[in-house]
Amino acid sequence: MKLLIYVLALTSLLLSSLPALALEPGERVDNFQLLDQNGESHELYYLSDMAAVVVMVHGNGCPIVRNVLPTLKEIQTKYEPQDVAFLLLNANLQDDRDSIHQEASEFLIDFPIMVDETQLIAESLDVVRTAEVFVVDPKTWKLVYRGPVDDRLAYGAQKPKASKHYLADALDAVITDEPVKVAQVEAMGCLVNLPEQDRRTVHAQISYSEQVAPILIDRCVTCHRKGGIGPWAMARYEMVQGFAPMIREVIRTKRMPPWHPDPHYGKFVDQRGIANDDAKILVHWIEAGAPRGNGPDPLEALDTEWGEWTLGTPDLIVEVPAFDVPATGVVDYMYPVAENPLDHDVWVRAIEILPGDRAVVHHVLASVEEPDRGRRRIPGNLGGYSPGKNAVPYPDNTGVLVRKGANFWFQMHYTPSGKAVTDVTRIGLYFYDAPPKHALDMEVIYDTSLAIPANVKAYHEQLDHVFEQDIMLYSLLPHAHLRGRAARFTAHYPDGSQEILLSVPKYDFNWQPLYALDPPKFIPAGTRVVLDMVWDNSAQNPANPDPGKMVFWGDQTWEEMNVGWFRYRLADDEDRRDAPAQAPSEQSAQSDTREYTSAATGLSEMPANAH
Ligand code: HEC
């Protein structure tokens, strides 16, 4: 009797020390977005037009993974034509993008391997071992199978042939809308170390007051405050608690904070991304129930004065002539001019643009006439405003000359918002006391012959520009409209090496910050900089106004653009002396300009369209 009680007690002890319930078939798999070994973006819920999505857990050097990949390949060959998408997921602490890229090259793995650096996605799938496959039904986003591909492999042994084909059976069932008979089988593979997975009770101890709120203040509150551009103010704990599930979602899908460059390439001024560790704190805290805990509420205590101008009071404020924006309809681009009231030349060190009404000002390009410039006018030589644009001062010691008598002109794009309003947008200019060392210059590349076929998920076009002189490159800005999907700038140096300067794997029309290189980059004469732009003109792009139409170049957002901006200055001897070796050698070796093809997600239907 005593023994029985002892055994019962022990069992319950064992049970209670088990990790929280594993994600089981029938449960929903939440959306996520991750980059793969090539820097391409994969979002689970983008695959809603698929019949099934297969995600297999990957790990470098795991013999079971290597052994099972050829079988997975065979299954892919059979099921991809039936609209099944195949992805791998690597959440190993010891693997990173470069080593995964290398493993993929060495073992000829052409599946996208999503890199789960924070382990947040693997944690939510309750991943235990590599080589386990998860089959998700996009009709419901429910898990319908988890387990091994088949029963061929065992530890240290393998049968010549599998007798049970779990994955294929599950796919046959999902495709024909039948229930999956064997929905869960114990997986065989290398254990994945997820140190935080079993710590859900510990996560309830994450302090809102000391850990969570400071991250929100640092990364979110500039926009999510009263009068800010975010749709709701993080004014106190209760707001955050209410939006907690949504915060978890935007972090898992990398929508927020709005900063979309691939962190693998380049460093940028004023980057507003969130560190992996901070993302983990937020999500773990939310998954633990977003407890208030003790301590004061730093959000409530926050008394930052948010000035109208983020760069301080301007030296000159120029008003764009008032414009009556109708309630509805389409307004062509306007090119108003504002007189320059100054009676002397000035060097501008920064500008900030304050839209009169953010709901109707889609974008502004601010320019100053350049009377002595014998070449085409470049709109935006002073700077611009677009949604999500940050006010960035010009780089140190560089400026734009505004001559006495040279007027300001603007390209204004107004988008009616349902209510007639009069917009007065203002431009704040900040001057240098003494002329700066360098004049800032600008180059624009674009293609007005752009034509994007209907119903294509990934249409590619390349633009390029050869810099004929040595320059210091300050910033880059790719621009497309609602169908923009990805953008990448690559420098092709005269010595034959290549370097990716900026990659935006998931372009978001709503967020077009100026990407200012930190530090600025010396670009030797003869360098060709290529802009690879990709558009998604399919129904899978939720922003697409009309997937059934071929789209051409045009000003309006339902038309398209392919534009690249460079802000630079001419280099001098000092820059040449300080210039580091051109491209880091490992990057040129990797030369990552392979197409954005991904057989699994159907992105390979269009050839690259170099023009
Ligand atoms: C640069 C400004 C900015 C920053 C910084 C920012 N947001 Fe946002 N956020 C916005 C805007 C604007 C929207 C609405 C448009 C959109 O979703 O793109 C938004 C939308 C959201 C939404 C979705 C609301 C909904 O229901 O659609 C959530 C949740 C959110 N933000 C959370 C955050 C969190 C958490 C952070 C910090 C880690 C953050 N944001 C940082 C501007 C910002």
Image (cartoon, rainbow, N blue to C red):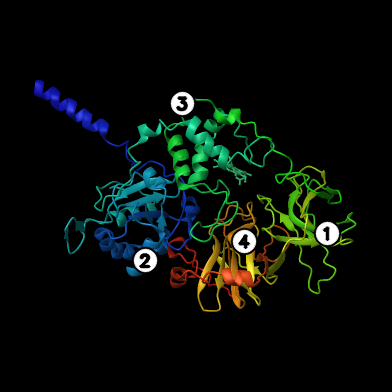
Q: Nearer the viewer, residue 284 or 473?
A: 473
Labels 4 and 1: the sequence-earlier one? 1
Dot 1: element: strand
Name the kind of residue labelled 2 in the image. Answer: Gln
Q: CA distance from mark 4 to mark 3?
A: 52 Å
Quadrant for ligand 1 reads top right
Q: Is residue 120 above or below residue 341?
A: above
Q: Is any atom of residue 461 visible in this view?
A: no
Q: Residues within 10 Å of mark 1 (few under 14, many from 20)?
A: many
147 left or right of 428 in image: left
What residue is shown with label 1?
Answer: 409
Q: Could you say which quadrant of the image residue 372 lies in?
A: bottom right
Residue 290 is tagged as none
Name the kind of residue labelled 4 in the image. Answer: Gly
Mark nearer the viewer, 4 or 3: 3
Q: Position of residue 51 (x, y in %)?
A: 43, 55
In the rendered image, the quadrant that contains the N terminus is: top left
Q: CA distance from mark 2 to mark 1?
A: 51 Å
Tags 4 and 3 in contact by the CB under 8 Å rule?
no
Dot 4: element: loop
Residue 293 is tagged as 3
Dot 3: element: loop
What residue is shown with label 2?
Answer: 102
Name the kind of residue labelled 3 in the image. Answer: Gly
Tags 3 and 2 in contact by the CB under 8 Å rule?
no
Labels 3 and 1: the sequence-earlier one? 3
611 left or right of 400 in image: left
Q: Position of residue 184 (x, y in %)?
A: 28, 46
Mark nearer the viewer, 4 or 1: 1
Tags 2 and 1 in contact by the CB under 8 Å rule?
no
